[in-house]
Image (spheres, rainbow, N blue to C red):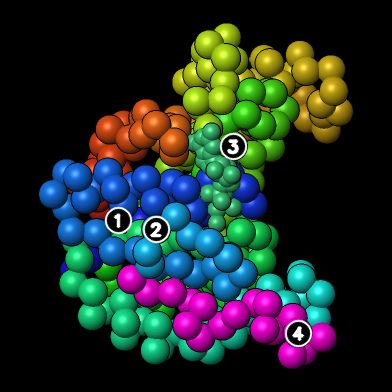
Amino acid sequence: MPYYIIVLGTAGSGKTTLTSMLMSYLDSHQMDVATVNLDPAVEDLPYNPDVDIREWVDAREVMAKQGLGPNGALIASVDMLALNISELKDQVDSLRSNYVIIDTPGQLEIFAFRDSGPVVLRTIIGDSKAVSLFLIDGLYAVKPSNLFSAMLLSASTFFRIKYPQINVFTKIDLLSEAEYSGLLSMIESPEELASRVVEDAEANLMWSSEEVYSLAEKLYTFESVSVSNNSGQGFDDLYASIQRVVAGGEDYF
Ligand code: GDP
Ligand code: MG
């Protein structure tokens, strides 16, 4: 049975670029890997998907034919994706790869926070093992309150999707050394994150410092890795984290 790697994250967090880099990484380590594109609105992909939702659903066509705006067309497309899922699943089942990477639609909220997204994933994956990679834009995460809210979003995505999850900070090639070490210190320690969130004057907190600290501690249930999808930096760590989840199986959480 293949092992599924689901790539999730807000628009522009680097899902498509990471899918492409992870595919090359696994491929260069002699692993048999396939890719599935579930984004009905993407125009150009940096990789050649083995299965592509655009074969069944084209968000631009939905927009033109149903007279919908971009957002409405995306919602309709993701629902149409659910209708075409059995054909798509047959194609995925015929791939026979060790790893199948699933690149998801640009808008996390449309995919993860409506019913169709989790249903689509559950249907494709069936009884196989899977891990979710929750991508967080590293440039955005250098600010403590942004990092905190991104980690809360990661946790609420986990509650919907329900596969073991890893937080993946992307675009570290764009950070200065000081920004990168600041980010790492927050990623590695809930105390550091909590104290910096509390210090952050712009964060208008509804929680006391103790509450922020205990929330931060809970958010560290997920492993974190940081990568550059351009240079491939951090992909050894990412692969090691994925392997730990595979080995840990259902009891991971
Ligand atoms: P998606 O919407 O989550 O699929 O994001 P994309 O993969 O399309 O990436 C959005 C933009 O960020 C593109 O211009 C990518 O080239 C860029 N990008 C993604 N990952 C990285 C990274 O690790 N480093 C840098 N420098 N740019 C990145
Ligand atoms: Mg994308």
Structural distance between the alpha carbons of marks 3 and 2: 21 Å
Q: Residue furthest left?
A: 30
Could you tell which of marks 3 and 4 lies nearer the N-terminus?
A: 4
For residue 64, the mark is 4
Q: Secondary structure at mark 2?
A: loop
Q: Report the Cα–Cα distance between label 2 and label 1.
A: 30 Å
Q: Which mark is residue 22?
A: none
**Disc marking residue 250:** 1
Q: Residue at x 76, y 69 (%)?
A: 71
Who comes first in sequence, dot 3 or dot 1? 3
Give the CA distance from mark 3 to mark 4. 32 Å
Q: 189 above or below 103?
A: above
* Residue linked to disc 2: 47
* Bounds of the magenta segment: 50-67
> Label 1's element?
helix
**Which-is-in-front pick, marks 3 and 1?**
3
Query: Spatial distance from mark 4 to mark 2, Cα to Cα?
Result: 27 Å
Label 1 amino acid? Glu
- Nearer to us: label 1 or label 4: 4
Q: Is residue 242 left or right of residue 144?
A: left
Q: Amino acid at mark 3?
A: Asp
Tell me where residue 88 appears, x and y as whole percent. 40, 83
Question: In the image, which is nearer the foreground, mark 3 or mark 4?
Answer: 4
User: Is residue 130 in view from this perspective?
Assistant: yes
Q: Is residue 218 visible in this depiction of the protein?
A: no
Mark 4 or mark 1, which is nearer the start of the sequence?
A: 4
The amino acid type of the residue labelled 2 equals Tyr
| Residue 175 percent across, percent down from the top left | 57, 21
